[in-house]
Image (cartoon, rainbow, N blue to C red):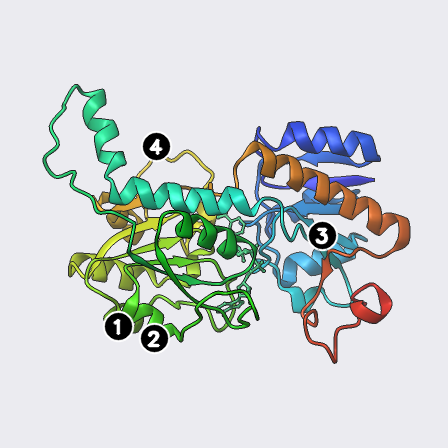
């Protein structure tokens, strides 16, 4: 089986080549992202392997279908960049639902601690033999209230980490987990009570811009907002205003709404056209990492192993437990529960 692997990075290749060779899946690595201009590269392949910032919209799906491609293997959990409704009946979409919730949850805490203890400032100072502490005063996490939005795999690991720090945890989830011992509140209550807000829900219609001008108004002065989930959960312009007005005390962003053409690439010698991102990065209380939360050795290995086993499973039986479609989760319409596949 030949798979066109888009947005390939040097750190992807060793694990995908290892598991691919073991299972008869040959990857053709392309550095470019998948979009309408690059989709022809997949010609002659049995499927494509794509990532978070590839564009899998209707024209791309139609082109892949015309080429005879019937499988898209996403090597990630989120699939908001796939027009999954348009795929239905044409191309099966497989994904890696979980690979290391610890990688993302630990990165979330790493960003939070870096921000509130000013490690990003201290690192640069001591590199320059500046040992002054002025302006580096932080605050204790112990006793603070953290509001977690989305209490799935990653959110729950993050909650455990926070409890280890002696923090009070409150949470909001569209589908609260019964008997979890989690103190669920409404979004308004979460915004009003939290010293720190951390986002761990997927991007969907209800969660789009969940952090907005309106919600920031409800928050405590000095609130710290952490987003390691998806960029469009935050209205970045509203966040910038909140920071300028000193309402938001700090922001830690591993994702950004308009990251697709920027993140994962080296633009150090270029002028960034995105004024909002550029302004956010100039702020002393904003930390940006480039969609890095997943990037641990364990996660990379698990991602490659599951992606390859999804492909092998699908080509062996025409079914894959990690297939998804827009009906999935809807008890009445979900065909996967009955047929083992989405269509
Ligand atoms: P999960 O599916 O285990 O949990 C998601 C939770 O969010 C569920 O409990 C669900 O009920 C809840 N939810 C769904 N819609 C919601 C809404 N509108 N409002 C509030 N809650 C809602 O997913 P998991 O594995 O915990 O991942 C969470 C998110 O983390 C992913 O959707 C993805 O966007 C992001 N992610 C980011 C990575 C990174 O490198 N920065 C890597 C992996 C995932």
Please give the name of the residue rendered at 68% of the width and 45% of the height, measured from the top-left corner.
Answer: 49
Please give the name of the residue rendered at 66% of the width and 50% of the height, measured from the top-left corner.
Answer: 96
Residue 268 numbered mark, or none: 4
Is 202 drawn above or below residue 316 in the view shown? Answer: below
Residue 279 numbered mark, or none: none
Spatial CA span between label 4 and label 1: 37 Å
Considering the numbered disc 1 on the image, is that residue within a helix, a strand or a loop?
Answer: helix
State the residue position of label 1.
218
Please tell me whether mark 4 or mark 2 is closer to you in this view.
2
Residue 188 numbered mark, or none: 2
Residue 291 visible (yes or no): no
Which tag, 4 or 2, sits closer to the chain's start? 2
> Which one is in front, 198 or 80?
198
Which tag, 4 or 3, sits closer to the chain's start? 3
Considering the numbered disc 2 on the image, is that residue within a helix, a strand or a loop?
Answer: helix
Dot 3 beta carbon under 8 Å from ligand 1: no
Measured as percent of width and height from the top left, residue 250 is found at 25, 52
Measured as percent of width and height from the top left, residue 300 is found at 61, 36
Dot 4 beta carbon under 8 Å from ligand 1: no
Side of 174 relative to 89 (left or right):
left
Tell me if mark 1 has few (under 14), some (14-19) or many (20+) residues whose alpha carbon lies within 10 angstroms of its own: some
State the residue position of label 3.
72
Considering the numbered disc 4 on the image, is that residue within a helix, a strand or a loop?
Answer: loop
Please tell me whether mark 1 or mark 3 is closer to you in this view.
1
Tell me if mark 3 has few (under 14), some (14-19) or many (20+) residues whose alpha carbon lies within 10 angstroms of its own: many
Please tell me whether mark 2 or mark 3 is closer to you in this view.
2
Spatial CA span between label 1 and label 2: 7 Å
Spatial CA span between label 1 and label 3: 41 Å
Quadrant housing residue 318: bottom right
């Amino acid at each position: 089986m030949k798979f066109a692997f888009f947005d390939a990075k040097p750190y992807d290749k060793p694990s995908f080549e290892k598991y691919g060779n073991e299972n008869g899946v040959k990857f053709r690595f392309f550095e470019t992202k998948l979009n309408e201009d690059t989709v022809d590269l997949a010609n002659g392949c049995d499927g494509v392997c794509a990532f978070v910032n590839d564009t899998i919209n209707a024209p791309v799906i139609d082109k892949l279908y015309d080429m005879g491609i019937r499988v898209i293997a996403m090597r990630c959990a989120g699939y908001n960049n796939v027009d999954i409704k348009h795929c239905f009946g044409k191309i099966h979409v497989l994904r890696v639902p979980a690979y290391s919730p610890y990688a993302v949850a630990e990165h979330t805490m790493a960003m939070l601690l870096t921000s509130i203890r000013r490690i990003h400032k201290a690192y640069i100072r001591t590199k320059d033999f500046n040992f002054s502490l002025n302006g580096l005063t932080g605050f204790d996490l112990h006793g603070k209230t953290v509001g977690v939005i989305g209490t799935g795999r990653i959110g729950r690991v993050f909650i455990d980490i926070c409890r280890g720090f002696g923090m009070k945890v409150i949470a909001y989830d569209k589908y609260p987990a019964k008997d979890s011992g989690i103190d669920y509140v409404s979004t308004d209550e979460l915004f009003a009570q939290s010293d720190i807000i951390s986002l761990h829900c997927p991007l969907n219609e209800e969660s789009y811009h969940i952090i907005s001008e309106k919600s920031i108004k409800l928050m405590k002065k000095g609130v710290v907002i952490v987003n390691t989930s998806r960029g469009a959960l935050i209205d970045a312009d509203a966040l910038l205003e909140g920071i300028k007005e000193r309402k938001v005390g700090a922001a830690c962003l591993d994702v950004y709404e308009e990251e697709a053409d920027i993140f994962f690439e080296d633009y150090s010698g270029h002028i960034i056209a995105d004024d909002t991102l550029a302004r956010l990065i100039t702020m002393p209380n904003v930390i940006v990492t480039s969609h890095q939360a997943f990037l641990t050795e364990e996660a990379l290995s698990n991602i490659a192993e599951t992606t390859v086993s999804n492909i092998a499973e699908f080509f062996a039986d025409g079914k894959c437990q990690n297939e998804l479609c827009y009906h999935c989760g809807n008890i009445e319409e979900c065909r996967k529960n009955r047929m083992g596949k989405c269509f």
